[in-house]
Structures are given as structure tokens and as C-alpha cells.
Image: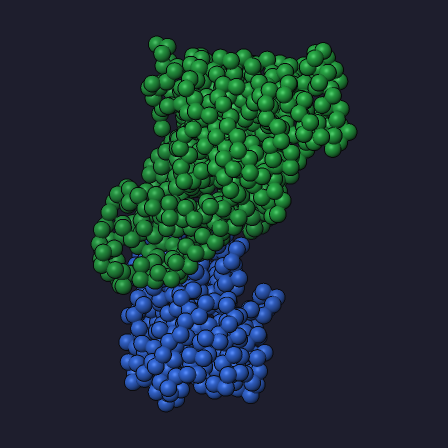
Chain colours: A green, B blue
Amino acid sequence: MAEAASGSAASSAPSAPRLSRGVLGAGADALAMALAVVAVAVLAELFAGAAFQRVVTHAAIMLTAVLALQIFSGNTGIVSFGHAAFMGLGAYVTGILTMPASLQATALKQLPAFLGGYELPFLGAVAVVIVLGVVVGLVTGTPLLRLGGSSASIATLALLIIIYTVLVAGREITRGSQPFYGVPRDVGLWTAVPVALVAIVVARLFRETPIGLSARAAANEERGAAAVGVDRRAAWLASWVLSAVVAMVAGALLASFLGAFSPKDFYFDLTFTLLAMLIVGGMGSSFGALAGVVVTMVIIEVSRRLEGGGTVLGVEVPTLFGLTQGALALAMLAIIWRRPEGLAGGVELDLLRRARRPLPRPAAEVPPHADVAPIVVMGLSKRYAGVVAVDDVTLVFEPDRTIGIIGPNGAGKTTLINMIAGDVGPTTGTVDVGQPTGVRSAAYVFARSGVARTFQNIRIFPRMTVLENVLVAARQVAPSLVAAEAAAVRELKRMGLDHLADRPATSLPYGLRRRLEVARALALNPRFLLLDEPAAGMNPVETGELIAILSAVRAERRIGVILIEHDMRLVMNLCERIVVVDHGRVIADGTPAEVRRNPDVVAAYLGSRTGARTMAASDASAEQSKGDQTDG
Amino acid sequence: MARIRTSRLAAVALAAAAVGAAPAAYAEDIVVGVATAQTGGLAPYDQPALAGLRMAIDEINAKGGLGGKYPVDLIIKDTRSDTAQTATVAQELVDAGAKIMISPCDADPSISIGQITQPLGIPTITLCGTAPVLTTAVGDVMFGSYPGDNAQATVVADFAIAEGKKTAFLLVSPDSTYTANLPEYFGTVFEKKGGKVVGRASFTMGQPDFSAVVTNIKNLPEQPDVIMTAAYEPDFPAFIQQLRAAGVTTPVYGADALSTPTIRGLGPLVDGVVYTAAGYAEPGSTLDAFNKAFEKAAGHAPESIYEANGYEIGLVLDEAVKIAGSDDPAAIRDAIAGLEDFQGVTGKITYAGTTGMPLRPVVLMRYENGGTPVYVKTETPAAADVPAP
């Protein structure tokens, strides 16, 4: 998972770090969590009896399983009900592969010959389980992740029922609903705990890897993620597969820990146990998974010892079976009431970030674009159930120029921009962005081929930090995380956001969110930048600052800017060419001076009183450099 | 001692409240560890049997303990109907010095416990588990107490042959051990004794539509003499209603799950249905006396035959310790395994020559005259007839 800084812009400096800041931080966190788990295990080994060691072993297995769930649900935001079934698959595979052949002959009389008699050691079985986990993850994830959000959740529930049914029906292999027994009980403290440590490291590092970042970005804001080049389905599928593998390994541990089990042990009860632990701790972070398992196990162990009755600290306690369930239920209620994001609040330990480590050095400025092909739009139309939003538009957008698209409300400007950005497929016509976009043309493909954009209503990733927001975009074009991080810092500095890098994006005020979105778009090192009302909702000072930065970047990097804006003064001052759209058609195209005098444009804007004033105002402002400001 | 060290760690790692909550045992006491479901889905099965066992232990302790010498310290822990928790609890009971272990009614947790007690040689008895595989999956320390599925099926098959039935149809469900295997055990014995299984159908538990199964039976070239199933509520009432509604009058035989008020309430529909029970409280019988004594001690009548079954576990342990003459687990195990024709509450119990599931009388009952249970007979299957699990 380590990212080498080869060939990056940042690596020109001799002291360039080998690991990205995020990965280093994750390593520190993972180390801290692992040390805590090892400390408990060592205490159990030295001071506790066999029974308490079993408790710790079981806790380590549950920790592995809950971390598996967190890898998927925590990074994609989709609650999975299917992970108990993956554990079941892992358990049965391990059971069959490790069972002594003599026992197989009596317990599994009808076992197909090719499955019998392996007698693998536990770790050998785990290796097979890992390979199978990848296969199972791909086979189940590919159809499942065509869905998103709650539909995907429901699909995981269906998956749980399907796998359970298959396990019950596969009587020759699984003994059906009867107990599967005779699995060598090889899992003790020092098998379960090391596996749990690996799971901690994997889960903690994963969210900082390019795939983990992409998965989280898509979970935060799907369209925003696509606009910076994130392939949601690929990122989520990777999370799903990794998560399935870890869950199946947890199942393998459980099989060897229990020795006897049946499909019902991997059904709703286990599903809800895993989910309850993750919800108590907080789904958003691996630290949450650890906290959830620890707190739940402590509650169970304490109340379990109390419910049998007896004398505790001199107080007579009556026998009260059911106390454990009661205590767990109360804990769940308390968490949902007081801390809906879980005990950890969805954040990681972030030890290094808390230690205020400085940002890495910004990457060198990118060289200006040269010989860039124009964006060519041919006969583009978009119809929504009879409404023609864009009607047979043919345009050429030259690079290295600022081109404004104006028009009355509902003229089809945003639809046009959405089609140029690949966000919306045209009904007829083609968009050629100068690079092949493949058969599966989608927003993320356009973004990776140099067409970046911002949105009218800002689409940043609220639950990620400011730096992570930009990092997601930068990594789509940078060769490594280290290079991407340096590039992200460069864009943050340019936008004056570098001092806020570790703040969650949701904490930024409106004006700074706009800047963050622009910084994110620039991190893609685009040839074209599509800005959908960049000045909306900002005061004149903020607008002025943003325009100054944008003009400077445009000039330095020779980026083509396509701009939708209602602020006529801004458009007339900034744009070298203006396209006027009305009722989905281009009604004028030319320099600001030409457009302003075009009678069709004036007529279109006369449709509303504001429009008339707008044209008059822009006219006046262009000639006298002052006039009324309108919102359009 | 391991338990003290556990407590010390608990004090360090958990909370001070966790210390030393387990009751202490006196030196001459024999610790009987009971890992049962106090909560969760298994609790309704474990609790009646446990109530019977407690009553037996109370009576035995009043007379000086097991074998008259070893007062019993019964340590009861909740498994929460969870297999992993069961294994942990069993280990704790072993650490607490258990020389005899009592496991839940279900097979998975019982096997899990057996895997802990087998290497230590601690005799382990399931409260009311009936899966015959339960004992062979573990080894020689594991014992059943209730008539096994195969034993019940043998008695029903013997009865069918005696009634002159020649052909049988089996209705199974792979959804549980009981519904999957009991009819097959019946089929094995039935065919061995000259009958013929002419067809099989499978159903999904909790799925009330039996139309496909009923059509299948109705369209058989020749109607079977008997339909054997281990279906229970809510499947059995749905099945018999749809079967009779389709005009099929073939008698239906079942097992011990059919003695419920709901099924009795079906009235004439269930007339002719033969089923099994672990005991029949004829007035004046020992079971009748037990039921009265239980009601006096517990304040309510037994909910089922499981109370008597649990009580018999206490009697078996008492007898085994008496024969062993010591509280050594290995000696007690050997004594249980050697029991022959031991007089329990419901009849004679034999472990000698079995794989751990006892041979004991199975009662046959039949619904007649609009759903009234009528006692047919009591039979103890011959060890050689009972099919291997």
C-alpha cells in the first residue's frame, strides 16, 4: 500500500518523503490501535485463565469481522447486511479444508471427491479463503454495486438470504442445516489477535489509499466525485472485494474457534451483532470499529458476571438473567440518542494530524498547456420527456480563451455544460473533448481527460478534510499519492486555503467552499475549466478575489474557461467571447461588443423586466465601468 | 487458581464491579456446570428442562448429595442462545471446577461444549437435544437424555409395520435437522422391515403453501398407506388442512412435536394422526406422581414433558455417582455409559450399548374423535433396530 514517489513533480526535491502524509498518519494510528490490542492480549496471556483468553480471542475475531464491515460500509456509506454470510462462506471453506479425512468419511459421506481429504493447516486454509474471497467479492459485487445507497443495502440483505439458503441447500458439502462439526480447533489467542492486527492495519490504511479516498468521495457526493474523475463503481467494488476477503477470513477464524456451527450461526443474529458493534463505535472510521467492539465486549463481560447473582463489592446482587441483553440495548439507545455518529464520531485517531505536522512542500507549478485541441460540440440536443432543453447546438470552444454562456433562466445553459462535462448524455449529437473518452463515456472519464468543472450548487465532499477534497482530484492525474499531495497543497496555497487543510470541509463558510471547489477542479490540471455560476451567492469582494485568481491561473496555465454567469458585468469584463442561449438554441455568438448589440439578444432578454435592465446595465458598465449590479 | 487470576485481570481490564461474582464452592461439593440459554431463541426449550433438573438436585441435596455423599453446587450460566458464547461459558464452568456438564437443547452449542469437555473427560449431558449425531460428533463423554430422533422414528416405523402398512411417503424439510432426518430414519427402519418408501417431497419451513406437495401425493399412481413427516407448527396444520381439502385420506404419522393445543384444536382434521411422546401420565403412574410433585414444588404444572426429562437427568447423575462411588469425572462417565434399565420417571433408561443417545420408552399417541389424544402404547426400541445417525 506504500506509494513510491517516483516521477512526481515533488520528487525533484531531494528530501521528498516516500509516503504520503495520509498514509503515514494511518500507519501511526494503526500502530497505536495494534499496540492497544496486543497489550490486552499479553495481559490475558499472562494473568488470565483459559476462559478469559477465549473471551479475548472471540473479541479479536469479532474485531476482524467488524473491521471488514467498516472497510465497505464506512467508506461507501452503504450499510451491508451481507457480511455475516461472507463469514459463513469462509467458515465452511475452512471447515472442509481442515477437517481430518477420517472424520470427513463419517460426517460428510456425500462430499464430492474433489473437495475431500485436504487436511490443510489453518493458515493454508486461510490462503485459499483469501483467493476465494476475491472471487466471491467480484461475483457478488459486480451486479450489486450497479445499485447505490439504500437499494444496494437491500441487495446485501438479499445476498445474506441467498448465501444462507445455498449453505442450507448444499447438504452434501455443508451438512445442510445440521451442525457442521469436526473442524480442528486451532484458533487461540495468538492466531486470532495477529489476524485482527492485520485487519486493523488494512482498514486504517485503506481509507487513505487512492481507492479508499475515491470510495469516500463518491459516498460523500456522487456527482462531485465523478466531476473530479472518480469512478464510483470501481472504487466501491474494490472496497467490497477487500471487505469480503477480510470478512471471510474472520469466518475462517470463527469456524476454527467454534469447532461446530451451522448456517443459522451466520444469519440475522450475527448480522445484527456486527452492525450493532459498528454503530456503537461509529461507522465512519476503523477506530470506531475498534471502539465499538471493545465497548460492546466490556458491557457483555461485566453484565454477564453480574447477572448470575452473588456478592459484588459487599452488595448482594440478585440473579437477573437477561441483564446482558438489557445493558446492550440501553447502550445502543444511549449511543443513538447522544452520539448518532457513534462513540468515535466517525473520525480516526489522527495522532499525527493532532500533533500538527506541517503540510508537505507544494509541487512545482504546472507548465502551461500548449497545442490543445478545442472542444467540438456537433448537433447536440437533449430532450426531457418532450421538453427540449438543448436543441441542435453546434459550437467550437477554443482553448486558452474565456468563453461565457449567457441566457435567460431555463435557457438550457446548465444542461449544455453538463453534456460538455459528460455528466449528462446527449439525446442526439456528439461532444468531442479532444481525447478519446471511450464507449462508457461518463463524467469521470471526461474529468480525467482534462475537462474539470464546478457546480452551481457547490458539490464538495463535506465529511472529508479540505486537503483530502483536493487530494482526491489530484490523485486522478498524479502518478502517486505523494505527488498528488504536493499538487493538492499547491492548489490550496493558490486559493489561500492551505492554513485550513486539515479542517473538515463542512466547517468552511460559503465563500471558501466555492474556492475549495475551484481548487479541486484545478488539481485535475485541466485543459478546460467549466464554471457554473462561480460568483453565485458571493459578495462583490469575494467575487473580485475569485475572478483575480481565476484570471491569473488561466493566463499562467493557458486553460480554456467556459463560464455560465448571470452577473453581466463579470461576463462582459472577463470573457473574450460570449455565446447566448435561449430556448435551447444559440441565438448569438461573438465578442461582448457584438453580442450586446445583437437585436435577438435584446429581444430574448426583453422577455423579462430584469433581463432588459440587465442588458442596459451591462451596456452601461462596459462603457462607463460602473452601473447597477443585478442578479440576473 | 485460574479463576482468581481471571478475576484479577477483570478488575484491571474491565471494571471493579466484575470481581468475584461467581458463587464459591465448598471443598466436598461436586460442581455441576449448567450452560443453558436463559435468554434468546433456545430459552423456551432449555428452561423447562432446567426447572426439572433443579427440582431433582434440590431433592438430592436434601438427602446428602449425589450418591448420598456429594452435595451438588449447581453453577448456571447464560449462553444467550449463541454458540460462541456457549463455548466461552463452558470454559468458565470448567475453570470453576465442573466435574459434570449440562449443555443446551440444541446440537451446535452442545457439540461446542463437548469439544471442550471431551479432552478433559468431563461427562456432558444435553438437556433435551434429540439429534443422534450430537453424541457421535463429540465422543464418549457426550450423552443425550431425551429419546433421539432415530429412536422415535424406529418406534413409529415398528408401529406402522404392525398396523400392516406396506408403502410410505416421506415429507421432509432440509431446514432443520429434525424435519430433515426423522422421516428418513423412519424410511430406513420401514424398508428394513419389509415396507417400501414410494415417494418423497420437500417443503420450506414457515412457507404455508403445500399445494405442490399435495398435488404430488394426489397424483401418485397408487396412494401410499401412510405419510410420514416431522413437520410441526405452523407447517403441519397448513399441510394437513390442504391435504384433507384435496380429498387425500391417507393417514399421517409424525413425531413428538405434534402434541400441541393448536394441533389438537384442528379437531376431526387430525383424527388418525399418530405421534410420539417421551412419556404418558396415566393416572397413578410415576410420571403422574412427578407432575403432581412438580406442581407442588414449582407452583405451576409442568409445561411439557421436558420437566420430567430434566428431572431424570438428576436421577441418572445420582445413580451414576452411586455406582462410581466417587466424584471422579471419568468414573461417573463410565457409570452413565454402563446404565441399563435404570428406572426413571417415564420408564426404563438404558445407555449400555448405545452411542450416547439413551434407549428409553417412546409413547405412541393417536388423535381420535375430533382431536382427542388417545394413548396407544409404550415401546422401547431394540438397540439393533435404531438406525445409525
Locate the N terminus of chain A by quadrant: top left
- At 31% across and 76% down in the image, what residue appears? B188
| One can see residue A316 in this view | no
- At 53% across and 75% down in the image, what residue appears? B237
- At 50% across and 39% down in the image, what residue appears? A429
Specify the quadrant of the image occupied by residue A438: top left
Q: Position of residue A445 (x, y in %)?
A: 44, 33
Residue B100 lies, with reference to residue A563, above or below; the image says below
Farthest top residue? A14
Residue A60 lies, with reference to residue A495, above or below; the image says below
Name the residue nearer the viewer: A444 or B204. A444
Name the residue nearer the viewer: B39 or A283. A283
Q: Position of residue B17 (x, y in %)?
A: 55, 37
Q: Position of residue A151 (x, y in %)?
A: 53, 48
| One can see residue A170 in this view | yes
- At 41% across and 40% down in the image, what residue appears? A439
